[in-house]
Amino acid sequence: MLKIQEIREIIKLIDQSSIQKFSLESDGGKIKLEKNDGQAVTTVTETPQTPQAAPTPVQAPAPVAPAAVAAPAPTAAPEAPAAEVVTDETLHKITSPMVGTYYKASSPDAEAYVKKGDKVTAESIVCIVEAMKLFNEIESEVNGEIVEILVQDGQLVEYGQPLFLVREN
Amino acid sequence: MKSPVKSELLKRLFAAQGEPISGQDIADEFGLSRTAIWKYIKELEEEGYEIGSQRKKGYYLIDAPDLVNQGNITEYLTTERYGRIIKYFTTVPTTQTIAHEDAQNGAQDGTLVIAEEQTAGKGRLARPWTSKANRGIWMSLIIRPDLAPQYAPQLTLVAAVAIVRAIEEVADIQPVIKWPNDILINGKKVTGILTELQSDPDRVKAIILGMGINANQQQSDFPEELQMIATSLRIEKGEMIDRAQLVAAILKYLEQYTDLYVEKGFAPIKILWESYAAITGKNIKASMVHETVEGIALGISHDGMLELQLADGTVRGIYSADIEIKN
């Protein structure tokens, strides 16, 4: 992966040269530069090397040209999955059916729907995911025991993101 | 629940068809004082009945409130499915809980649960909602659109557009929408929507659209702490509105726009929503569970997410937050 200083150096060199387009791939990182009527366009693509590291958004260095292109920052970097538990493939994952905010209880004062170690049935409500004031009560879908809660109360969760691990009966 | 004496009073007032009935006779019959009867009459007036009194002759009915019962709503109803089954209650803790259970028990698409009064109305995160008897519209609609659950949240914006259209049509007032689906008039809240989803992993089973609409309240009907932030259609328009007619109009637009969304996606709804939105270009404070951000509202994304431009120029997408308009 390219270091931020290296990217900055490359931009400087390209900017001073007559090169209009430039791309470089090294160590799973990819950089693409394009000059357009004196305006620099920078795209940095990263390929995460190891699954345990959550990708850190790279702030594109300020190009020499005045029109800065800010890399769109993801709203929230997904939490790194709890790698040591996920490896147990026999566990059932309860995933989020939509993008939204994860709530462990029906209201801030109420008790959590489930705790680690709780027994659940397929119809048990395990949490709420909310988006735009639509509240989705998530059901366990399997009979078993909650062995891991993978998200924090109030966290933004992605579509398909694992929320719980359940050991099925 | 109405007391038996009050129900009897009401029955006789209706039966007399505007002719006076003797309070003394009823008092004697039930072994009560005339003052007790007078108190029941006052309670009926509180509920919206207009009752006159004539010396020596008694009480007579001038006008009955515009109840949101099946008969009154159906008179205006033009829908195919929504509101074709109506469960009407005088008073309930909350229509949402009843609708939830009905949906679980297989209630048909478009079933409406409506009440004259809620004693435990609730909003987002179980916040209480004031639901005065016979004044507002307190209802929960069960719908079963053919959608995957990740496309369900946009229905809260569909609902906001439908209610605004209905208010425009029936009350001739122009409300605005505050993201995602609060409805305001002159900066004060006139409608709240709470939507709950029952789903399989890949299919929506039922959506329960809970709606609270401040229709015919007067200023004094709101608790003091709400008077600065809540209003009603009656306060804004200066006259009573026909609640049953408004319910029928809301159901009409809800059916129309839900079908439009299911068939054509969010794009046409986005245009409608933005045409009523109160926030584009405004300075917004968005409070989430773990953080608060401020920025200029750019509008909504192709899937209804609020887009805020922060001070550093980056654009932040908001899926769930409490929104405060700063200017």
Image (cartoon, rainbow, N blue to C red):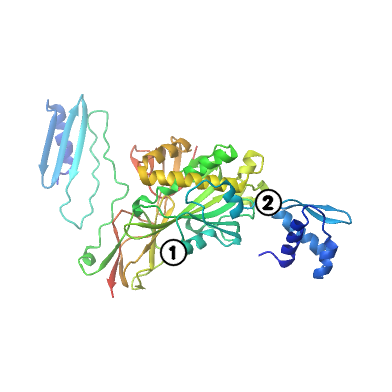
On whether disc 2 and disc 1 are found on a single subunit, the reply is yes
Output the chain of dot 1. Answer: B
Q: At label 1, which amino acid type do we have? A: Gln
Looking at the picture, how far across and down is residue B168, in whole percent? Answer: 55, 38
Label 2 vs 1, first from the N-terminus: 2
Q: Is residue B242 left or right of residue B15?
A: left
| Label 2, label 1: how far apart the Cα atoms are | 33 Å
The answer to whether residue B323 is above or below residue A95 is above
Q: Nearer the viewer, residue A76 or B150?
A: B150
Residue B185 visible here: no
Identify the disc placed on residue B65: 2
Q: Quadrant of the N terminus of chain B?
A: bottom right
**Could you tell me which secondary element the residue under label 1 belongs to?**
helix
Q: Is residue A162 left or right of residue B231?
A: left
x and y percent of residue A110 in the render? 47, 65
- Compared across the picture, whether B80 is left or right of B203 comes to right
Q: Is residue B36 visible?
A: yes
In terms of secondary structure, where does tag 2 sit? loop
**Which residue in the protein does label 1 denote?**
B104
Residue A41 in picture, x, y percent from top left: 21, 32
Labelled pair 2, 1 in contact (Cβ < 8 Å): no
> With respect to residue B124, does A111 lie above or below?
below
Residue at coordinates 46% horizontally, 47% vertically from top-left? Answer: B255
Q: Position of residue B114 (x, y in %)?
A: 56, 56
Going by the numbered disc 2, the residue's amino acid type is Pro
Q: How many marks?
A: 2
Pointer 2 chain: B
